[in-house]
């Protein structure tokens, strides 16, 4: 039974490994509203976003593509606030940026043509693909791959993602350990200081009481 469970676990891990690091979402923007979300990225990771911004048309009673609507994308590192990407784009297209450091990144999108009091309603579909910059650089620009070669390449991409994630977690663990050791050191130092002050206070009180009793000729 244990062998069967192990086999199923291995198969599940292989299937999860060949899945691409891609996720999609959609949301609505009204007027000058800005939508932001955070993504935790390892260092030197390329993020590619494909988007489509559709404007609500009262005439057609549905969302349509309006070439006059512009989308602005900005990406900031958190918590430093360092801006690594800022671009005004067409209502449909693609953007790319590469993370310079590991950590949280804020990705914000908003319409660049809407005024402050505009009531324009935009539906924005966004697909994000996350991959190692080295994998993207070595990928062939033309030619086709067999299904097996494609799966092997996807598996290599996933393994690279796992290694980068492990490296990122090790850095976080190291930082947390350093902070814990510093906090424990401060706690021990403060405890020793308190014990020293308590000992000095007790000695002073004992001496004071002894003098008091001697003055009263009680001892």
Image: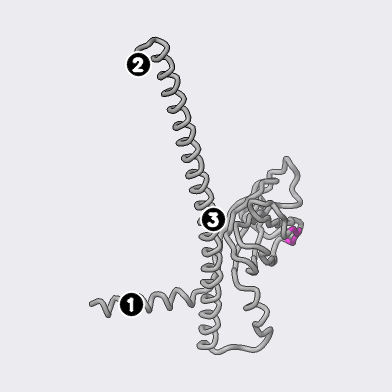
Residue 198 vertical position relative to residue 16 in the rendered view, above or below: above
Observer-side mark, 2 or 1, equals 2
Task: Identify the colour scheme used.
Answer: one colour
Residue 170: percent from left, percent from top:
52, 64
Magenta part mainly helix, strand or loop? strand
Disc 3 marks which residue? 178
Of callouts 2 and 1, the N-terminal one: 1
- Which one is in front, 210 or 18? 210
Labelled disc at residue 219: 2
Q: Nearer the viewer, residue 96 or 54?
A: 96
Q: Which residues, given as a range, are shown in magenta?
A: 86-90
3 or 1: mark nearer the eye: 3
Figure quadrant of the C terminus: top left
Image coordinates of residue 46 in percent, x first then y, are: 65, 69
Quadrant position of residue 137:
bottom right
Q: Residues within 10 Å of mark 3 (few under 14, many from 20)?
A: few
How far apart are the alpha carbons under marks 2 and 3? 55 Å
Please rate how many residues cluster around mark 2, counting C-alpha atoms within 10 Å: few if below 14, some from 14 to 19, many from 20.
few
Which tag, 2 or 3, sits closer to the chain's start?
3
Is the residue under label 1 in contact with that under label 2 (CB below 8 Å)? no
Mark with earlier residue (3, 1): 1
In the depicted structure, whether residue 119 falls above or below residue 49: above
Instruction: Pinpoint residue 55: horizontal percent, then vertical percent.
Output: 67, 54
Classify mark 2: helix, strand or loop: loop
Query: What label does residue 8 carry, if any?
Result: 1
- Indicate which label's residue lies in the foreground, 2 or 3: 2
Task: Find out whether residue 101 is within the magenta segment.
Answer: no
Q: SS at mark 1?
A: helix
Q: Residue at x 66, y 48 (%)?
A: 34
Q: Residue 211: x percent and y percent?
A: 43, 17
Q: At x 48% / y 77%, what residue is drawn?
A: 18
């Amino acid at each position: 039974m244990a062998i069967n469970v192990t086999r199923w676990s291995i198969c599940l891990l292989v299937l999860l490994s060949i899945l691409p690091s891609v996720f999609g979402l959609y949301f609505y923007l009204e007027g000058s509203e800005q939508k932001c979300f955070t993504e935790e990225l390892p260092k030197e990771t390329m993020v590619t976003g494909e988007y489509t911004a559709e404007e609500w048309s009262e005439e057609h009673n549905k969302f349509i593509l309006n070439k006059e609507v512009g989308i602005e994308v900005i990406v900031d590192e958190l918590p430093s606030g360092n801006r690594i990407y800022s671009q005004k784009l067409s209502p449909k297209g693609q953007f790319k940026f590469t993370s310079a450091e590991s950590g949280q990144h804020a990705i914000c999108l908003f319409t660049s043509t809407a005024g402050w009091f505009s009531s324009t309603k935009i539906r924005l579909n966004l697909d994000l693909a996350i991959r190692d910059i080295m994998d993207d650089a070595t990928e062939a620009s033309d030619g086709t791959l067999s299904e097996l070669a494609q799966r092997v390449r996807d598996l290599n991409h996933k393994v690279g993602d796992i290694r980068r994630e492990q490296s990122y977690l090790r850095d976080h663990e190291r930082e947390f350990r350093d902070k814990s050791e510093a906090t424990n050191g401060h706690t021990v130092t403060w405890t020793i200081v308190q014990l020293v002050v308590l000992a000095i206070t007790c000695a002073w009180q004992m001496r004071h009481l002894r003098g008091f009793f001697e003055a009263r000729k009680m001892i």
